[in-house]
């Protein structure tokens, strides 16, 4: 039985070229980048080359890139690091009082759980902006909700379940004018759309390597020059004394190679994703009709799709009255047929539960629990899409 992997938003397979770039750093080049001898110097050169490579790719300065263990740590680092600076007193002895945070209702759990921790443990005030049916926040509402106590706004660049992209550039104009820190989670966006930190105008941004055919356990945080942020992991003086812990050089070498591949192949990747997304949309409409609801934004929404949606993702749900199986059974049966998709974010590990994202855009529990997220990757083909729809049709009927 041929196996088809259509869950690339959860993680991507390791590109063989990335693996090849990592192998020397898992073997003979084993030095610690903090050591002063030749082994350490070799690792240090690789570390800084990787920092330069990622910085250039996302329109940042090398000094603004900090390597972490992944997207979750980077989000925690940014949100808690900025917030902890609001605790305590000024040099004049006055208590710091800017305790107000604004976010959206469809953020990744790494953001929501961090914010809830800050609220429940330290008393930060927290507002979640609701979104429209497509998953975008209302910029006028954001502007209205910012007050004199607001110090942080965090809105994801692209949603990990719907693929919708928020207008971070316009959001940054609002926050910048009010001297409010703006954080954005770009984990799903890297490699799918063009990113430039200076153009976006954000203060911090999150990246993860395992979404771009590099290994798990490595990510990065962009921290705009001049940003006052608390150290999150204490210990050594690594990452310019902002993130303690010995750097994972082999994984960083893989991250670097993945970025180098994207420099050459990202445009062709995007064109391929768009074709598969368009084909999947057409086949679903032709074969399943009104049994399926397409939750992601339509592909013809704008001349420039990079502004509105990710090209490699489509979220669908089923009309309960039109199908003969419950959604959990469909997901399991797809897997038994060799087809891997997901019911939403992979970070709800093993639990099929109503998507908080779909509930936030207006779906009830039953409909929110019936969603499937199909996400394409570099190694998928259009025949994979055709086989998925064929099997799905059989299961539903």
Image (cartoon, rainbow, N blue to C red):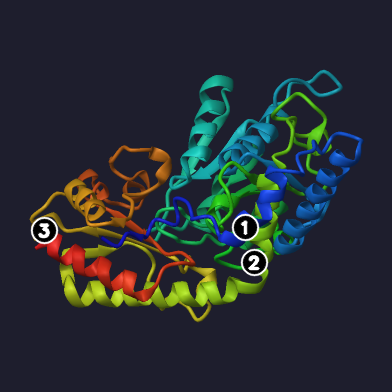
Give the quadrant of residue 118. top right
CB of mark 3 within 8 Å of CB of mark 2? no
Instruction: Select label 2 or label 1 by which is in front.
Output: 1
Q: Quadrant of residue 239?
A: top right
User: Eyeballing the image, is 12 above or below 251?
Assistant: below
Q: Would you say the residues marked 3 and 1 are in contact, meaning their CB atoms lie under 8 Å apart?
A: no
In the image, what residue occupies the spot 24% across and 63% down?
293
Q: Measuring from the top left, give residue 228's x and y in whole percent.
A: 78, 37
Mark 1 packing: few (<14 Cα in 10 Å), some, or many (20+)?
many
User: Which residue in the structure is indicated by mark 2?
Assistant: 261
The answer to whether the residues at label 2 and label 1 have Cβ atoms under 8 Å apart is yes
For label 2, the crowd category at 10 Å Cα-Cα, with few meaning under 14, some 14 to 19 and many 20 or more, is: some
**In the image, which is nearer the foreground, mark 3 or mark 1?**
1
Q: Is 279 situated left or right of 75 in this image? A: left
Residue beneath the point at 64% across and 66% down:
261
- Who comes first in sequence, dot 3 or dot 2? 2
Q: CA distance from mark 2 to mark 1?
A: 9 Å
- When asked about the image quadrant of residue 199, the answer is bottom right
**Residue indicated by mark 3:** 323
Q: x%, y% of residue 108?
A: 48, 44
**Residue 68 is at least partly visible in this image:** yes
Is 276 or 13 nearer to us in this picture?
A: 13
Considering only vertical position in the picture, is 268 above or below 47?
below
**What residue is shown with label 1?**
18
The mark nearer the N terminus, 2 or 1, is 1
The residue drawn where x is 56% and y is 62% is 167
For mark 2, give the secondary structure: helix
- Quarter of the image with the C terminus is bottom left
């Amino acid at each position: 039985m041929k196996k088809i992997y259509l869950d690339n938003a959860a993680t991507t397979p390791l590109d063989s070229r990335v693996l090849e770039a990592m192998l020397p750093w898992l073997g003979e080049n084993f030095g610690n980048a903090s050591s002063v001898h030749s082994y350490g110097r070799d690792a240090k050169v690789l570390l800084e080359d990787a920092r330069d490579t990622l910085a250039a790719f996302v329109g940042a300065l090398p000094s603004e890139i900090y390597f972490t263990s992944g997207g979750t740590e980077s989000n925690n680092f940014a949100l808690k690091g900025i917030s902890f600076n609001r605790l305590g007193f000024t040099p004049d002895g006055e208590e710091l009082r800017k305790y107000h945070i604004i976010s959206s209702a469809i953020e990744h759990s790494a953001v929501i759980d961090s914010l809830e921790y800050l609220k429940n443990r330290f008393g930060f005030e927290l507002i979640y902006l609701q979104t429209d049916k497509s998953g975008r926040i209302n910029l006028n509402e954001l502007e209205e909700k910012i007050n004199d106590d607001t110090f942080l706004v965090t809105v994801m660049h692209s949603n990990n379940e719907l693929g919708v992209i928020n207008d971070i550039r316009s959001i940054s104009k609002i926050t910048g004018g009010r001297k409010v820190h703006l954080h954005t989670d770009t984990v799903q966006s890297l490699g799918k759309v063009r990113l430039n930190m200076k153009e976006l105008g954000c203060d911090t941004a999150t990246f993860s390597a395992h979404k771009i055919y590099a290994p798990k356990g490595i990510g990065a945080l962009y921290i705009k020059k001049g940003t006052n942020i608390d150290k999150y992991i204490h210990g050594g003086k690594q990452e310019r004394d902002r993130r303690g812990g010995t750097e994972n050089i082999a994984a960083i070498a893989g991250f670097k190679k993945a970025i180098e591949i994207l420099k050459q192949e990202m445009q062709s990747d995007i064109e391929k994703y768009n074709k598969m997304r368009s084909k999947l949309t057409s086949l679903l409409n032709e074969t399943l009709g009104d049994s399926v609801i397409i939750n992601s934004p339509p592909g013809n929404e704008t001349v420039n799709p990079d502004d509105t949606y990710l090209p490699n993702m489509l979220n669908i749900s089923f009309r309960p009255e039109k199908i003969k199986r419950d959604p959990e059974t469909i997901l399991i049966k797809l897997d038994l047929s060799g087809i891997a998709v997901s019911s939403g974010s992979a970070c709800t590990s093993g639990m099929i539960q109503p998507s908080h994202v779909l509930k936030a855009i207006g779906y009830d529990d039953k409909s929110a629990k019936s969603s499937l997220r199909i996400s394409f990757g570099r190694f998928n083909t259009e025949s994979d899409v055709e086989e998925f729809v064929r099997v799905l049709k059989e299961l539903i009927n």
